[in-house]
Image (spheres, rainbow, N blue to C red):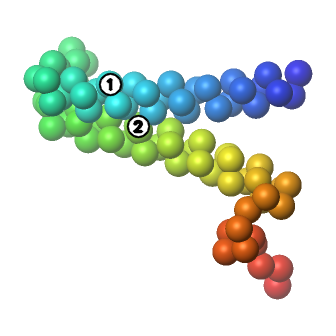
């Protein structure tokens, strides 16, 4: 059950990142989404969605690998 929940947690930001890529691609081809007033805003919103989804997935994987001690020395948190 925990693995399914983890998959769903990773799937939602992945879909958001993929939709962000779609918005940016559509801007280059001149296809404007009906709910966004301008192409420049569409590109910025797509870039923001892509970066947010990618950073969430990257942070999730880094956190998981830190717990299993599978990261390089520079990514290990220092204990004070």
Residue 37 seen anywhere in this rendered image of the structure: no
Specify the label residue 45 is tagged with: none
Question: Mark 1 sits on what residue?
Answer: 22
Q: Secondary structure at mark 1?
A: helix
- Rendered position, 15 above or below 61: above
- Rendered position, 56 above or below 70: above
Residue located farthest toward the top when viewing the structure as drawn: 34
Q: Secondary structure at mark 2?
A: helix
Specify the quadrant of the image occupied by residue 33: top left
Quadrant location, the N terminus:
top right
Q: Residues within 10 Å of mark 2 (few under 14, many from 20)?
A: many
* Image location (x, y in percent) of residue 27: 18, 28
* Total numbered labels placed on residues in the image: 2
Q: Residues within 10 Å of mark 1 (few under 14, many from 20)?
A: some
* Image location (x, y in percent) of residue 38: 13, 30
- Rendered position, 35 above or below 68: above
Q: Earlier in the sequence, mark 1 or mark 2?
A: 1
* Image location (x, y in percent) of residue 22: 32, 25
Question: How many angstroms separate mark 1 from mark 2 (CA)?
Answer: 10 Å
Residue at image point 83% right, 61% down: 69
In this rendering, would 61 be left or right of 21? Answer: right
- Rendered position, 59 above or below 22: below
Residue at image point 86% right, 28% down: 2
Residue at image point 32% right, 35% down: 46
Quadrant location, the C terminus:
bottom right
Specify the label residue 49 is tagged with: 2
Nearer to us: label 1 or label 2 = 1
Residue 18 seen anywhere in this rendered image of the structure: yes
């Amino acid at each position: 059950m925990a693995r399914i929940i983890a998959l769903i947690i990773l799937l939602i930001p992945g879909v958001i990142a993929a939709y962000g890529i779609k918005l940016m691609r559509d801007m280059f081809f001149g296809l404007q989404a009906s709910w966004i007033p301008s192409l420049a805003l569409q590109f910025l919103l797509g870039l923001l969605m892509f970066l947010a989804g990618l950073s969430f997935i990257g942070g999730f994987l880094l956190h998981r690998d830190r717990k299993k001690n599978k990261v390089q020395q520079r990514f290990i948190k220092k204990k004070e």
